[in-house]
Image: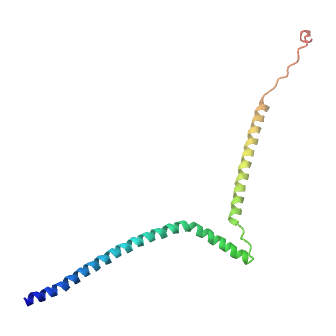
Amino acid sequence: MFATNLLERRRKPQRITDQAWDQLVSAVGSAGDAARLARRHTSHMASEAGHRVGPATGEARHRAMAAVDALAGRRPAMPWAWIAGAAAAGVALGWLAGAMARSAIAHRDGADSVDARIEFVEVDEPTGSSLRP
């Protein structure tokens, strides 16, 4: 009887310890799942915020640098790329207009040369009295 009582006493704390350990492992596992879920959620939110803020960041940086330059008394840089692009477009349009003008002149001269090749015959007017009033 003494031995069974002793074994019973040893088993009860072991059983409580095992139950406590199982509950701890379960709690840590569910906390890990919750942490992974929270990480995914915050990662998604941060990514979405980055996509929204990205274009605005570049514009804000450009404006801030322009403000710093203005406060320092520096003039804005000349937009040489735009100037070169406009000059190239002007040259292209001028060349196109010249080609069209040359084509129109050649076409007109070609029509005049056809008219010049036609031979006109002069006819005397009739002298009859029947035609006069």
Q: Position of residue 105 (x, y in %)?
A: 76, 42
Query: Residue 125 or 6: which is nearer the viewer?
Result: 6
Q: Quadrant of the C terminus?
A: top right
Query: Residue 60 or 88: which is nearer the viewer?
Result: 60
Residue 4 falls left or right of residue 41: left
Image height of 33 relative to 133, above or below: below
The residue furthest left is 1
Image height of 107 relative to 6, above or below: above
Say which quarter of the image contains residue 88: bottom right
Residue at the image point whose x is 12% and y is 89% from the top:
6
The residue furthest top is 130
Color scheme of the displayed model: rainbow
Query: Residue 28 or 53: which is nearer the viewer?
Result: 28
Query: Residue 61 or 13: which is nearer the viewer?
Result: 13
Q: Position of residue 85 (x, y in %)?
A: 68, 60
Q: How many discs mark residues in the rendered view? A: 0
Residue at the image point whose x is 31% and y is 77% from the top:
27
Say which quarter of the image contains residue 83: bottom right
Q: Quadrant of the N terminus?
A: bottom left
Q: Position of residue 62 (x, y in %)?
A: 64, 70
Image height of 80 relative to 31, above or below: above
Say which quarter of the image contains residue 4: bottom left
Residue 53 falls left or right of residue 111: left
Q: Position of residue 16 (x, y in %)?
A: 22, 82
Residue at the image point whose x is 41% and y is 70% from the top:
40
Residue at the image point whose x is 90% and y is 9% from the top:
130
